[in-house]
Amino acid sequence: MTSSITSAGSTSSLAQLWQANVSQTQNKQTPPPPPPGGDSKMQEDMMSALSDAGIDTSHLTEEQSDALTAFMQTLMETLHQQGAGQEQESAAQESPMQRDLQSLLGQLTGSSESSSTDELQGQFSSLLDSLGAGESGVTLQQFLSAFSDKMETNRSEPGYFVNTSA
């Protein structure tokens, strides 16, 4: 009888341990939320970068908007993964997002491909297809370079970057 009580107690402890591990895993894999207003500013800059590449983004349908949102989410997850693998020291003028974007551009320029860049490339292709620009010849690298320039130009606007240093 004592063993069944101990067994039940052990099961409860294992369940609590499992739940704690699941919570920790979920916390590590979830990128931080964007700053207030950051999504709309980011979306504006993405649409501007697409427009600069000759892709019409003036009247997005719901499907096109969904494709852009899915691409933005995949981009943020990929940038989060880039940041997790880098040292956190950077120049005071460089934001973590800008640093991660430059790292991603370097990875795309080089020959090293990864599943995260493959997924991002697939999302970008889906976005271009939904915009009717699948045959435009615009590459993910070209788009990210233009997007990076937009971020740098709009650096002083509120809501895009958050200073997390204490």
Image (cartoon, rainbow, N blue to C red):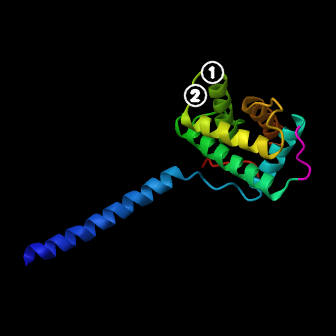
- The answer, for residue 28, to whether it is visible in the render is yes
Asked which secondary structure carries label 2, the reply is loop
Residue under the image location 20 percent in, 72 percent down:
9
Task: Please state which of residues 139 and 33 is positioned toward the viewer in this rendering.
Answer: 139
Task: Please state which of residues 69 and 95 is positioned toward the viewer in this rendering.
Answer: 69
Residue under the image location 64 percent in, 46 percent down:
74
Classify residue 111 as left or right of residue 141. left
Task: Please state which of residues 75 and 102 is positioned toward the viewer in this rendering.
Answer: 75
- The answer, for residue 156, to whether it is visible in the render is no
The chief SS type of the magenta part is loop
Q: Position of residue 61 (x, y in %)?
A: 84, 56
Q: CA distance from mark 1 to mark 2?
A: 8 Å
Classify residue 34 as left or right of residue 136. left
What label does residue 133 carry, if any? none
Answer few, some or many: residues within 10 Å of disc 2's Cα (few below 14, many 20 plus, some between 14 and 19). Answer: few
**Residue type of the residue flagged with mark 1:** Gly
Q: Which residue is mark 1?
A: 110
Classify residue 6 as left or right of residue 161. left
* Segment colored magenta: 55-59
Task: Examine the rendered structure and indicate whether residue 25 appears above or below residue 86.
Answer: below
What label does residue 113 carry, if any? 2
Q: Position of residue 115 (x, y in %)?
A: 55, 36
